[in-house]
Image: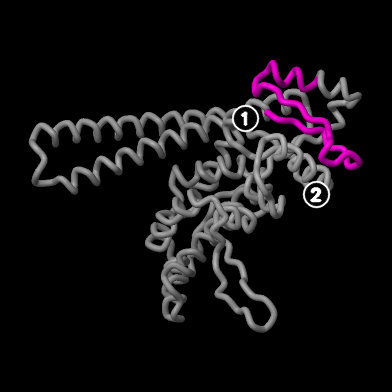
């Protein structure tokens, strides 16, 4: 990993070093900063959010009680402006400069608890298995009529194995949630909302870090690509209000099935859908609004600490 200790007077001549992305390299980082006569406790570390690649470094920062901020690579890239060429040393300098310029505005990053991280791993595992299951089902449908009997039997065995694995993963998820009172409480609260099943409820827990990373439902809706944004400028540009593509598409995609179920079984949302349909609203627009309502409900029940209750007058 490349590290640059930004000095506004030196600019591009700021000191730079390259260290291994492991425990040995992290210890050398401390020694390197001491050599520069810098107290590591007074340093603000900034890095691109690179998932697994930067996880071990984040764990080191957490253990040492150091201040750090993991920033979206897209946000970082766009902040660089016009660039010519690329290498790790230059990128390290640009990131350190960004860190210096925006230090007062940056939000510090904190890793989720080990249980939330465990839920994320299990959730991702389930999604991978479900994806393989879907591919297998599609292949069987497409080759129906031309597949041999033995081929169909093997495919059915694979589907049975996928189903068994999904059941096992879901049991592990429930077991992990039941071991943590805070997770268990919020899980039961969110799952009380009509339309939200186990998968969507766990997605809420994982992506909100058990409802600690987002202060309200509107911010989470923005994160999930559900909040619409205006597109206008002056008097000549009047674009259609749309949701942004810069979002976690997985959150939105999984809420689609939840919204469909809610429209069928929640009298209030069913009435809302029919009213908007009569007003001439498009199906996608209405469903997006319903997803937004479900997000607000999730944050409301967690904040209130009581399960969701249907409005009787809605039916």
| Pointer 1 local density, CA inside 10 Å: few below 14, some 14–19, many at least 20 | some
Q: Residue 6: percent from the left, percent from the top? A: 83, 37
| Label drawn at residue 165 | none
Q: Is residue 180 above or below residue 189?
A: above
Q: State the count of labels.
A: 2
What's the magenta region?
Answer: 1-30
Q: Residue 169: percent from the left, percent from the top? A: 40, 31
Q: In which quadrant will I find the C terminus? A: bottom left
Q: Residue 220: percent from the left, percent from the top? A: 61, 53
| Pointer 2 local density, CA inside 10 Å: few below 14, some 14–19, many at least 20 | few
Helix, strand or loop under label 1: helix
Q: Please say whether residue 181 is one of the residues in the magenta stretch.
A: no
Q: In which quadrant will I find the N terminus? A: top right
Q: Determine the residue located farthest toward the front in the rendered image.
A: 84
Closer to the camera in the image, 227 or 57: 57
Q: Is residue 207 above or below residue 255?
A: above
Q: Is residue 225 left or right of residue 108?
A: left
| Residues at marks 1 and 2, CA–CA distance in whole angstroms | 23 Å
The image quadrant that residue 40 belongs to is top right
Q: Residue 62: percent from the left, percent from the top? A: 72, 28
Q: Identify the coloring.
A: one colour
The image quadrant that residue 297 belongs to is bottom right
Q: Please say whether residue 29 is one of the residues in the magenta stretch.
A: yes
Closer to the camera in the image, 108 or 160: 108
Q: Residue at x 44, y 29 (%)?
A: 172
Closer to the camera in the image, 220 or 306: 220
Closer to the camera in the image, 112 or 92: 92
Name which of mark 1 and mark 2 comes first in the sequence.
Answer: 1
| Label drawn at residue 55 | 1
Q: Provide the residue designation for mark 2.
A: 105
Q: Is residue 129 left or right of residue 295?
A: left
């Amino acid at each position: 990993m490349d590290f640059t200790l930004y000095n506004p007077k030196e600019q591009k001549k700021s000191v730079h070093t390259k260290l291994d992305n492991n425990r040995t390299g992290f210890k050398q980082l401390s020694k390197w900063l001491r050599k520069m006569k810098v107290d590591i406790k007074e340093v603000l570390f900034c890095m691109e959010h690179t998932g697994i690649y930067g996880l071990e470094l984040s764990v080191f920062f957490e253990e040492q009680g150091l201040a750090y901020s993991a920033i979206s690579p897209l946000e970082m890239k766009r902040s660089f402006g016009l660039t010519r060429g690329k290498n790790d040393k230059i990128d390290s300098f640009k990131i350190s400069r960004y860190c210096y310029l925006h230090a007062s505005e940056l939000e510090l990053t904190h890793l989720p608890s080990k249980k939330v991280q465990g839920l994320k791993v299990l959730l991702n595992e389930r999604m991978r298995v479900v994806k393989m299951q879907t591919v297998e089902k599609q292949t069987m449908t497409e080759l129906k009529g031309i597949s041999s009997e033995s081929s169909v039997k093997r495919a059915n065995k694979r589907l049975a194995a996928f189903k068994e694995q999904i059941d096992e993963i879901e049991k592990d998820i429930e077991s992990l949630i039941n071991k943590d009172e805070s997770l268990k409480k919020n899980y039961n609260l969110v799952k009380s909302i009509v339309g939200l099943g186990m998968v969507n409820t766990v997605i809420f827990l994982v992506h909100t870090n058990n409802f600690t990373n987002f202060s309200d439902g509107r911010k989470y809706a923005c994160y999930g690509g559900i909040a619409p944004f205006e597109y206008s400028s002056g008097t000549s540009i009047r674009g259609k209000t749309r949701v942004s593509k810069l979002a976690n598409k997985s959150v939105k995609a999984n809420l689609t099935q939840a919204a469909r179920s809610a429209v069928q079984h929640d009298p209030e949302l069913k009435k809302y859908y029919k009213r908007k349909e009569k007003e001439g609203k498009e199906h996608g627009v209405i469903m997006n609004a319903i997803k937004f309502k479900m997000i607000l409900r999730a944050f409301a029940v967690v904040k209130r600490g009581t399960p969701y209750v249907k409005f009787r007058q809605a039916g």
